[in-house]
Image (cartoon, rainbow, N blue to C red):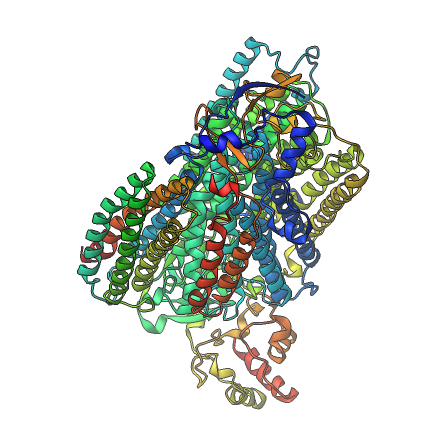
């Protein structure tokens, strides 16, 4: 029975929100942790709804009920005063019992959400103004690699993310999988979550981090374990060399026009460390930390004038001739 | 509304001492909030102490002697301070004048020692968070010392002018009361600044 | 001790009626002319200025809110640049918290508390004048900076390291931090004044259990200010030092820690919420007693709840930091302490409900706002219980859910009572009634507009919308709810326009109020509307918690205070037994000069540390001028 009530509640709350199912919503959980949080949340919501309704009904009755005849304000009935005093105390005591009960429920939920799995897949996320550096680390260095703004994880397996910041405080939040955790300068935090189903879950920086805080999204792609293994093997490889003329020209322009001062492309001479690693940029789904979906058009627009799309971000507008832009774009698209 | 006089307060005095006077309560209020300021600063020190394994950070602890000498002077100053306080309650103008001069001189001596103490902290404010919080706390207390000294000097001058009326004696007692706060505040700060880094 | 003086002096027992009133009025009035106005130390004059200034900042802060709602009404709009938006949301929060909410409550206290406790002026009237000037100058400093494009842009919480010199190498965070110093000086000064006024200036016979509930609320609030604000002063000072002289409080590479800032900020920041809310509850209790036509049930319960709320408010700041990686058990304990505050808040609500249950409600605008308060605030309190839970908070923290929550608490808990209070005390302050018709429009538009604007934000937060974003992408499905919210904000803004129109209209055309238009029970209604400069011709004697209901024919008073020099009656702390007739300061221009000198010092010191050196002598001179006896009878007795 309680299960059915809970289901009904979930339906009721999420009905108007069906459109955003699965993307970036605490109400559409796809992870073990976000499931637990939603259960706690719905319980609190139910208690809150009951209490609020009771107060408003009490208020309404208090205002509408027939009163005794007008008297002087100080002509009080001692019996009524005493009885009311007792009722007030009883209600106060009930409040105490409810909040203590809710505290215990909350703590139980908290234990589940923050439970640790020692066999978790570990990766490190470093917050930058305004993008996410993602490091997959392995015991053997040649199995470690760096990517950006997109995290791929296997379904059904616990994932531990270690959170650090390269500059100011950020907060990693993918509501469909779990609650948020801050990335704090000079401190190491961690967060664990497990995705139940395959899918793309969007997240966004939740701590104000300056000019482009609004455009600092992250995508979590949950893949089946096999698929994840294949992706990891592929991602671990260095960038493929361009085979066509335009691509080779693009590679060379990437260095000549200054892109390589900030961006790293493994296996090439481009070794900048300030901006996102672009080794496999062609296989990503978004541009500029989730600002736009990745297509040749959006990537081209981004390279042509990053300050128009995300004003104030640290990627400067490079003076490129249209031929040069096309070559660089062609090169980057090949980096699958 | 009709008024019915039920009592006449004409016989009451026009000023009082201690909790019977308004300014005394004002001083209490300011001491409470300034005391809270000290408590917060101490809290900040202890927080930084707790999060750093290395303390004091990159520096030797402050030299002990300036702070210790100050403690001695502060404690001894309670005696002339209390004598001034009592003289003021007796409205003994001559003794109040002497007491205020002595207290002004003590304040100046302490300010000089405070300067020496800053020079013997063995760290600068911009060396590390340790240096910053030490300078902040010492600066905060020095502000109180300087403010009280300023008040004492002005009162001293006042007591040599035609304004040395009975009501002023109440001000002198409030000033003496506040001095005790300056002394009392120094003791935990001394332990914190000079001894905690030696733990 | 002053027998000689006594014999020559004219007392208020020697005169009566109009003659007495005229003499006292001449003695206590603010001097005429511009200089006179700048010299005023009358708590009513200063209180009125304080209230008007705080409401001016409310309108400015509200205008910023409308700009933000226009920007967010649809996805990827370019109405505001990210730079402007970040300044605007920072200015909105800072203005509302530091220049409106806290000052307006203290302003009402400055005006009302001396009247409610039956005295002639607030304790330390010159400090009161100084406090107002500091508030005004601090507010102007912030807003002029904003208009010069140096408005702070790091949030009203100014988290380091974003607000450090490295990441914000402009003067903007300095402006924010120094505005804090201005307003905290002002707020701390008023708190001490209120505490001493309540402790020592109560009318004879106003024992602790006869103090009006608003006065109790302001007493508790003042203590909260005194113990919470030093924390933010230490924080803002150390931030300025980090930025100006390279101290390392918040620099992790030199042993500093960003979380120190958060602890210091929220140790102040959480009590701050109660500094705003507790005065609101005081207003509710006063309005409710008058319009339910009976005393509020559970007077001692309400007072104990206020005190308990005050104590508890210092033990829950950590719930603002649940996602900073704190130890789990510690965080869990702060969940319990945070929820515990629902008990005293709940007890007060139950007392008010019981009062309405037994009372015979008179549906005038002030009561409507109190009813609105209960409906809105309880919802905000309950979402607060949700936010206090660590697992729930990890989802809703820093999302629009929290924006909804605290607007329900602050607008529901403080602004609704405040607007009710405006309707309730406007007749006392101006002598004229506000229009009831406009009042009803004001109330219903406020209630509807508020809920339409803020309720959808709960859902927006749960479906993933973070706070402090200047825009959002079109594929996020947040557009509809944001549009609804923006529409509600416009309706809500119209309700304030109606309030403004009502005030302007009623100042000239409103019905005359008389001394006690609502047949209320407390002492401020025992004098004329607006009250004369001396407040009361003779100091009342209090024999009952509701003196004007106890006896509405005649007012027992004491006689024997001077009518040749400003004198107030000091009484004992608990029993309010008369103790001394203390002099009360005359008007003086020195508080203004001191405030100007302090302003130069404060503003100078964000540009150069040497300002501490050259800024101090003018302040010292001004302070000596302030305290130096002028040779008047007030000073020399």
User: Which residue is painted at 33% across and 66% down in the image?
Assistant: B125
* The C terminus of chain B lies in quadrant: bottom left
The one of B142 and C299 positioned closer to us in this rendering: B142
Q: How many marks?
A: 0
| Above or below C474: residue A30 | above
Q: Is residue B72 visible?
A: yes
Residue C154 in picture, x, y percent from top left = 53, 61
| Residue B51 position by quadrant | bottom left
| Above or below A11: residue A238 | below
Residue C361 in picture, x, y percent from top left = 69, 21
| Residue A190 position by quadrant | bottom left
| Above or below A38: residue A208 | below
Horizontal side of B80 relative to C236 (left or right) equals: left
* The N terminus of chain B lies in quadrant: top right
Q: Given the current orientation, which residue lies at the most extreme right position?
A: C509
The one of C511 and B47 positioned closer to us in this rendering: C511
Horizontal side of C431 relative to C108 (left or right) equals: right
Horizontal side of A247 relative to B172 (left or right) equals: right
User: Which residue is painted at 41% across and 45% down in the image?
Assistant: B30
The one of C338 and C613 positioned closer to us in this rendering: C613
Residue B85 in picture, x, y percent from top left = 30, 41
User: Which residue is painted at 45% across and 36% down in the image?
Assistant: C310
The one of A90 and C504 positioned closer to us in this rendering: C504
Q: Is residue C372 visible?
A: no
Residue B138 in picture, x, y percent from top left = 31, 58
| Above or below C117: residue B37 | below
| Residue A78 position by quadrant | top right
């Amino acid at each position: 029975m309680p299960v059915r009530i809970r289901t009904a509640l979930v339906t009721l709350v999420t009905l108007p929100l069906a459109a955003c199912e699965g993307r970036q919503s605490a109400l559409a959980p796809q992870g073990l942790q976000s499931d637990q949080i939603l259960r706690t949340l719905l319980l609190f919501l139910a208690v809150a709804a009951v209490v609020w309704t009771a107060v408003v009904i009490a208020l309404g009755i208090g205002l509408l009920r027939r009163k005794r005849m007008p008297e002087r304000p100080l002509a009080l009935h001692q019996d009524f005063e005493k009885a009311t005093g007792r009722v007030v105390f009883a209600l106060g005591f009930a409040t105490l019992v409810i909040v203590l009960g809710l505290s215990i429920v909350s703590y139980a939920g908290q234990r589940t959400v923050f439970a640790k799995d020692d066999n978790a897949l570990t990766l490190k996320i470093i917050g930058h103004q305004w993008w996410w550096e993602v490091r997959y680390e392995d015991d053997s260095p040649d199995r470690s690699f760096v990517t950006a703004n997109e995290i791929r994880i296997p379904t059904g397996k616990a994932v531990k993310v270690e959170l650090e910041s390269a500059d100011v405080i950020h907060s990693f939040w993918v509501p469909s999988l779990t609650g948020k955790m801050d990335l704090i300068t000079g401190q190491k935090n961690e967060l664990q979550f497990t995705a139940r189903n395959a899918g793309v879950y969007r997240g966004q920086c939740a701590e104000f981090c300056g000019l482009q805080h609004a455009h600092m999204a992250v995508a979590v792609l949950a893949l089946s374990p096999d698929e994840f293994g294949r992706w990891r093997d592929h991602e671990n490889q260095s960038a493929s060399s361009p085979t066509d003329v335009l691509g080779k020209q693009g590679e060379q322009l990437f260095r000549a026009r200054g892109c390589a001062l900030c961006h790293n492309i493994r296996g090439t001479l481009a070794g900048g460390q300030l901006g996102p690693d672009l080794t496999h940029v062609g296989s990503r789904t978004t541009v500029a930390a989730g600002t736009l979906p990745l297509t040749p058009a959006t990537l081209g627009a981004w390279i042509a004038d990053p300050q128009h799309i995300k004003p104030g971000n640290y990627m400067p507008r490079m003076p490129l001739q249209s031929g040069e832009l096309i070559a660089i774009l062609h090169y980057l698209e090949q980096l699958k | 509304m009709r008024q019915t006089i039920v009592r006449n307060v004409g016989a009451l005095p026009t000023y009082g001492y201690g909790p019977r006077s308004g300014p005394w309560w004002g001083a209490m209020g300011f001491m409470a909030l300034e005391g809270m300021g000290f408590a917060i600063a101490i809290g900040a020190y202890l927080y930084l102490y707790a999060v750093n394994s290395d303390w004091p950070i990159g520096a030797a602890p402050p030299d002990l002697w300036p702070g210790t000498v100050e403690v001695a002077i502060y404690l001894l100053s309670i005696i002339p301070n209390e004598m001034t306080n009592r003289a003021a309650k007796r409205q003994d103008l001559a003794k109040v004048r002497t007491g205020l001069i002595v207290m002004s001189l003590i304040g100046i001596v302490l300010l000089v020692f405070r300067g020496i103490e800053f020079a013997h902290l063995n760290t600068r404010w911009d060396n590390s968070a340790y240096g910053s919080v030490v300078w902040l706390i010492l600066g905060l207390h020095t502000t109180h010392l300087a403010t009280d000294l300023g008040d004492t000097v002005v009162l001293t001058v006042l007591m040599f002018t035609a304004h040395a009326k009975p009501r002023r004696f109440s001000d002198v007692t409030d000033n003496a009361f506040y001095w005790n706060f300056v002394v009392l505040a120094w003791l935990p700060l001394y332990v914190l600044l000079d001894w905690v880094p030696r733990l | 001790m002053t027998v000689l003086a006594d014999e020559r002096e004219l007392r208020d027992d020697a005169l009566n009626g109009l003659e007495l009133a005229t003499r006292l009025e001449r003695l206590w009035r603010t001097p005429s002319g511009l200089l006179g106005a700048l010299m005023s130390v009358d708590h009513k004059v200063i209180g009125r200025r304080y209230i008007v200034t705080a409401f001016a900042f409310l309108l400015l802060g509200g205008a910023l809110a409308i700009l933000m709602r226009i920007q967010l009404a649809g996805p990827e709009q370019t109405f505001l640049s990210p730079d402007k938006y970040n300044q605007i949301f920072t200015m909105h929060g800072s203005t509302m918290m530091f220049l409106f909410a806290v000052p307006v409550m203290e302003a009402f206290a400055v005006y009302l508390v001396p009247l409610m406790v039956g005295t002639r002026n607030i304790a330390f009237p010159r400090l009161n004048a100084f406090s107002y000037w500091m508030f005004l100058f601090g507010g102007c400093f912030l807003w002029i900076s904003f208009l010069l494009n140096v408005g702070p842009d790091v949030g009203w919480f100014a988290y380091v390291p974003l607000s450090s010199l490295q990441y914000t190498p402009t003067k903007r965070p300095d402006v924010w931090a120094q505005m804090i110093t201005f307003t905290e000086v002002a707020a701390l000064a008023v708190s001490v004044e209120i505490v001493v006024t309540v402790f020592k200036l109560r009318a004879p016979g106003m024992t602790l259990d006869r103090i009006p509930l608003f006065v109790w609320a302001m007493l508790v609030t003042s203590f909260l200010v005194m113990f919470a604000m030093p924390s933010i002063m230490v924080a803002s000072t150390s931030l300025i030092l980090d930025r100006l002289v390279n101290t390392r409080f918040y620099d992790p590479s030199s042993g500093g820690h960003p979380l120190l800032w958060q602890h210091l900020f929220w140790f102040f920041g959480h009590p701050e919420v109660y500094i705003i809310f507790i005065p609101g509850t005081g207003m509710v209790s006063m309005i409710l007693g008058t319009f339910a036509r009976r005393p509020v049930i559970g007077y001692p319960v309400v007072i104990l709840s206020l005190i308990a709320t005050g104590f508890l408010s210092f033990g829950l700041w950590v719930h603002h930091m649940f996602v900073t990686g704190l130890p789990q058990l510690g965080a869990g304990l702060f969940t319990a302490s945070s929820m515990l505050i629902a008990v005293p808040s709940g007890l007060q609500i139950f007392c008010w409900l019981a009062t309405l249950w037994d009372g015979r409600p008179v549906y005038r605008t002030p009561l409507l706002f109190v009813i609105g308060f209960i409906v809105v605030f309880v919802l905000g309190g309950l979402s607060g219980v949700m936010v206090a839970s660590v697992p729930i908070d990890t989802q809703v923290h820093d999302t629009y859910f929290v924006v909804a929550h605290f607007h329900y608490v602050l607008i529901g808990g403080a602004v609704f009572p405040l607007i009710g209070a405006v309707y309730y005390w406007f007749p006392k302050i101006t002598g004229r009634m506000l229009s009831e018709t406009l009042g009803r429009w004001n109330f219903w538009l406020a209630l509807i507009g508020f809920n339409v604007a803020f309720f959808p934000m709960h859902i927006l937060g749960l479906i993933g919308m973070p706070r402090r974003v200047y825009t959002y992408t079109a594929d996020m499905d947040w557009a509809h709810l944001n549009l609804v919210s923006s529409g509600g904000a416009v309706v809500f803004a119209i309700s304030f326009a109606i309030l403004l129109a009502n005030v302007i209209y009623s100042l000239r055309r409103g019905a005359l109020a008389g001394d006690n238009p609502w047949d209320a029970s407390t002492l401020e209604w025992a004098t004329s509307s607006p009250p004369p400069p001396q407040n009361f011709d003779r100091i009342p004697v209090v024999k009952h918690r509701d003196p004007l209901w106890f006896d509405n024919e005649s007012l027992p008073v004491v006689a024997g205070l001077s009518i040749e020099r400003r004198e107030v009656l000091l009484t004992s702390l608990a029993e309010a037994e008369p103790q001394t007739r203390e002099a009360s300061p005359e008007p003086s221009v020195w508080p203004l000069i001191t405030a100007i000198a302090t302003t130069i010092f404060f503003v100078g010191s964000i540009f150069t540390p040497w300002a501490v050196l050259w800024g101090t002598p003018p302040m010292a001179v001004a302070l000596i001028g302030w305290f130096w006896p002028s040779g008047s009878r007030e000073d020399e007795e």
